[in-house]
Amino acid sequence: MLSGITMKIPLDTICVKSGVLCPRCRKLVDSGTYTLREVEIMKQLLELEEQDPNYRFLKDVTYVKSYETNSIIVTILDVDDSIPQSMLIRLGKTLSEKIGLRVRVIRKSDPKTLIAQIIAPARIHGVNSVWTPDGDVQHIIRISRYDARFLPVEVKELEQLLSTIFHENYRIKIY
């Protein structure tokens, strides 16, 4: 893979484009580090970068990870801040059409900003961390009843998604 010429992905570009994985890429997929759905997403991103002039900015992007629930795929990309959020929203819609599932593309950032991007257009009113007696930590995200109407997916699905992404326990409290 030539850096700077094409989007940076964790698997070999030739493997992703052809759909035939070399032993190294196959091992990454078999170990669960990446999924076949992610290979499909990477392939679509590479094709968009090559074929659609609106997505030329993808050549400077690094693919981080995708997380899938029943009704949405959240794809995290390391994108320069000069790329407007509207481009990432449009990219998500284009990927949704190509894959057949809802895709939300978000910018790699700190945990609170990541959470805000995932639950947008709903707004976070606060995040509390509670330590349980067994030493675990549980993060409680507070969202107003008014904003809860704007959540992109069901509360339980969001809790599962956030817990998977951050490897900690997340709960959403609507007040």
Image: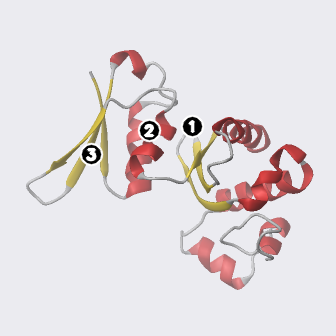
Name the element at disc 3. strand
Q: Which residue is mark 1?
A: 71
Q: Which residue is mark 3?
A: 139
Position of the N terminus, as image quadrant, is bottom right
Q: Which residue is mark 2?
A: 157
Name the element at disc 2. helix
Task: Give the residue furthest to the bottom.
Answer: 23
Location of residue 27 with respect to 174 vertically, above or below: below
Identity of the amino acid at label 3?
Answer: His
Name the element at disc 1. loop
Identity of the amino acid at label 1?
Answer: Ser
Percent x, y for residue 159? 38, 41
The disc, 1 or 2, on the residue closer to the chain's N-terminal end is: 1
Q: Residue at x 74, y 43 (%)?
A: 95
Q: Decide: marks 1, 2 in contact (CB < 8 A)?
A: yes
User: Which corner quadrant of the image does residue 50 belong to?
Assistant: bottom right
Depth check, front residue: 117 or 19: 117
Q: Nearer the viewer, mark 3 or mark 1?
A: 3
Q: Residue at x 79, y 71 (%)?
A: 13
